[in-house]
Image (spheres, helix red, strand yellow):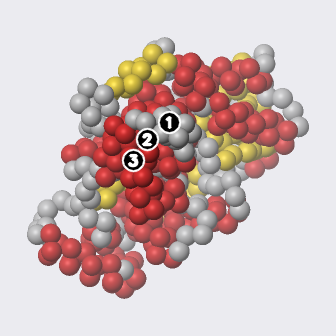
Amino acid sequence: MISGFDYGTSNCAIGVLNNKDNQHSAVELLPLERGHAFIPSALYAIERELICENVARLIGNKTLQPDYLNLRSNQLNLARAVRSREGISADEQSLFIGLDAFDEYQAMTGEGYFVKSPKSFLGASGLRSEFLAFFEDIVTAMMQGIKQRAEKHLGDSITHTVIGRPVNFQGRDAEASNRQAIDILTIAAKRAGFQSIEFLFEPLAAGLDFEAKLTEDKTVLVVDVGGGTTDCAMVRMGPSFRDNELRENDFLGHSGERIGGNDLDIQLAGRSLMPVFGMESLLKNGLPMPTQTFWDAVSTNDVAAQTVFNSMQTEQRIQQWLLDSTEPELIQRLIKFRAEKQNYQLVRSAEQCKISLSDNMLCAVELSYIEEQLRCDVSREQFASAIERPLAKMTELMDEAILQAGQQPDLIYITGGSAKSPVIRQAIQQQLGDIEVVDGDHFGSVAAGLTVWANKVFR
């Protein structure tokens, strides 16, 4: 079968074209977890070394298995040693994805290996070969699990797919970054069992879903605020264009950068939640508490920041703050937070707060997993203030795409989970003035568009 695969930063989805009546075809997003079409981009392993073992066991294309076993021989030996040392039986589940990964992470505080939004790391510069291999395994394990769930629902195998990609995975050295990320995704998709793989820009995919509904030609600015990136595309759409096999000439301008919903969550976590750990407290000498360590704590999409936060130097620095702070009880809370590796959990709380503030003016963030009865009230106004800098960058990307196209759009089509926020929608409207703004399916438009395109390129 043919599919569209949205391997997203925050959530993943996979779609197929359903034409059971042989007359009318419609995109069907397949249920992947607890009856829902979207599965959070998260993975938890009882032990880090067991990830490659799961990949080896579930490689979809068995002709690739011998080469993989040879490449990962050292890691597989480590995995066997870990199973023996920890008493983990061969039939015990050791890897979880999606909501199950969050459940295990929260139940096993401070233990195991947890990663959220691995797509954020794929284009990171300066990664050593062993880290690239590790990211290949993480992505492969997630793709294997998602593909298996989709095929179980269909009762059929999925062999061809179009995978969404941002315009740029990273801002710096974009060409090399994009090449590295695409290589990782391609290798992972092949090991997961896809025989044919193509890629399509995510904003264009989101626009294809919208284009099917247009009754007249329009020049559309597609603004896709994803979890890891914001992508903008100026596209000619409508009845005169949608049957074109090649769309390059209809793609008038595009821009994109690694700034998305995750960055909004991190900014909100830093400015509104980290103060309960002492971020805005004073030292006994009257100086303010240094803030960089607190930002490192919540920068869960930054490998370097996480490395620094978990370093011995940071532990020693925090211990010194415990002596120097005017509010040592807050620093003690930070010490416990760091020891129990609750930073991903805190950023997820910020994400849930962001979602709540789409419909409410105030959100009470429950932090009882940090400390009993701990909570923090956050207003929509505070959220707007917290995300001011990344939001300004998002609107700059819109201007860049319009400048490339050399014309104003007839309408603006906004999609992506974070674009649901009234704060972001208002910023878009203020930036471009009196141009109609249309909301898409904030979560499913990319997967739907990828599915439509897959059935064009593979038919």
Dot 2, how many residues are within 10 Å of its Cα: few (below 14), some (14-19), or many (20+)?
many
Report if residue 294 is visible in the image: yes
Which residue has dot 3 on it?
323
Q: CA distance from mark 1 to mark 2?
A: 6 Å
Q: Does dot 1 land on a helix, a strand or a loop?
A: loop
Q: Position of residue 126 (x, y in %)?
A: 60, 69
Residue type (three-letter) at the residue carrying disc 3? Leu
Residue type (three-letter) at the residue carrying disc 1? Leu
Left or right of 455? Residue 174 is: right
Q: Nearer the viewer, residue 124 or 100?
A: 124
Q: Are marks 2 and 3 in contact (CB under 8 Å)?
A: yes
Which residue has dot 2 on it?
325
Dot 1, how many residues are within 10 Å of its Cα: few (below 14), some (14-19), or many (20+)?
some
Which residue has dot 1 on it?
282
Q: Position of residue 218 (x, y in %)?
A: 76, 28
- Circle on res. 229: none
Residue type (three-letter) at the residue carrying disc 2? Ser
